[in-house]
Amino acid sequence: MYKRIVLKLSGEALAGDNPNVKFDNGIIKGIVNQIKEIMEKGTQVSLVIGGGNFWRGRSADHAMDRTKADQIGMLATVMNAIYVSDFLRQEGVGCVVQTPFKCGTMTEEFSKDLAVRHLENKEVVIFAGGLGHPMFSTDTITALRGAELEADALFFAKNVDGVYDDDPAKNPNAKKIDEIKCGDIIKNNLRVIDLTAASLCFDNGIPVVIFGLNEENSIVRAVNGDKIGTIVTVD
């Protein structure tokens, strides 16, 4: 059983398959119930949530300044974090949203000491707003916070059920990889997770599990160590 984990959720996952909504409450409730279950078994949980249900970088305007586009993306993650935090509250789970910049009274400014205290008090900590600077992905902030908090592992819940040797959306013969070394991801420039995040995991010895969120009870199964998704080792 893992003592402390960081779970990364994509913003798109919160919206489900309906392009006309930003949040699918059924999906979010299912995620929250799984988080509650693993916490009841003793695992401390922190979250990083992407902002893709609101904003996908410069896809809306390719001429847009990259810094401004990234700033909008950071704010999108804050909105998602506040939304999910209230679902946790409704299920009786304490939750705090931490950001690297001040957001009035809506969030708490990031502090490792405070984050650890919240986790030890059986509260979920959602890290929103990225690093507060452009050019960094939510994968990177997941790895960074995992290293800072000395997490046992990182869990990336994605739209695909693991890592493949080719794009499964384009190649029906693509084969799923059950286990891969973090060093191989970096060496072969594989776009499994952001390479900066992969380097942080490699340098700090943090294993990663990449799995499909849409599979039944996938978060619980991944944290329980069931054979699901792809394990990224750091040996």
Image (tube, grey):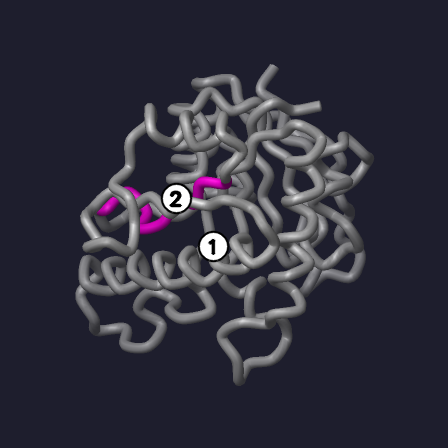
Q: Residue 85 carries which label?
A: 1
Image height check: is 209 above or below 47?
A: above
Q: Residue 220 placed where, x, y %?
A: 73, 41
Residue 71 visible somewhere in the drawing? yes
Task: Work out which quarter of the rendered image holds the N terminus and state it.
Answer: top right
Position of residue 163 in the picture relative to residue 89 (left or right): right
Q: Position of residue 140 (x, y in %)?
A: 39, 39
For mark 1, does the 10 Å Cα neighbourhood hold few (<14), some (14 to 19), or many (20 or more) residues? many
Can residue 164 be seen at all in this image of the molecule?
no
Left or right of 55, for residue 99? left
| Mark 2 closeness class: few <14, some 14–19, many ≥20 residues within 10 Å | many
Vertical arrangement, residue 19 with respect to residue 24, above or below = below
- The correct choice, above or below, for 170 with respect to 129 in the image is below
Amino acid of disc 2: Phe
| 2 or 1: tag closer to the N-terminus | 1
* Residue on which the image places disc 2: 127
Residue 54 position by quadrant: bottom left
Stretch in magenta: 124-132
Q: In which quarter of the image is the C terminus?
A: top right
Residue at left 76%, top 32%? 224
Relative image position of residue 28 (x, y in whole percent): 60, 62
Q: Which secondary structure lies at badge 2?
A: strand
What residue is at 55 percent from the left and 53 percent from the top?
A: 88
Q: Residue, x 25% and y 41% (percent of image)?
A: 109
Q: Position of residue 133 (x, y in %)?
A: 21, 46
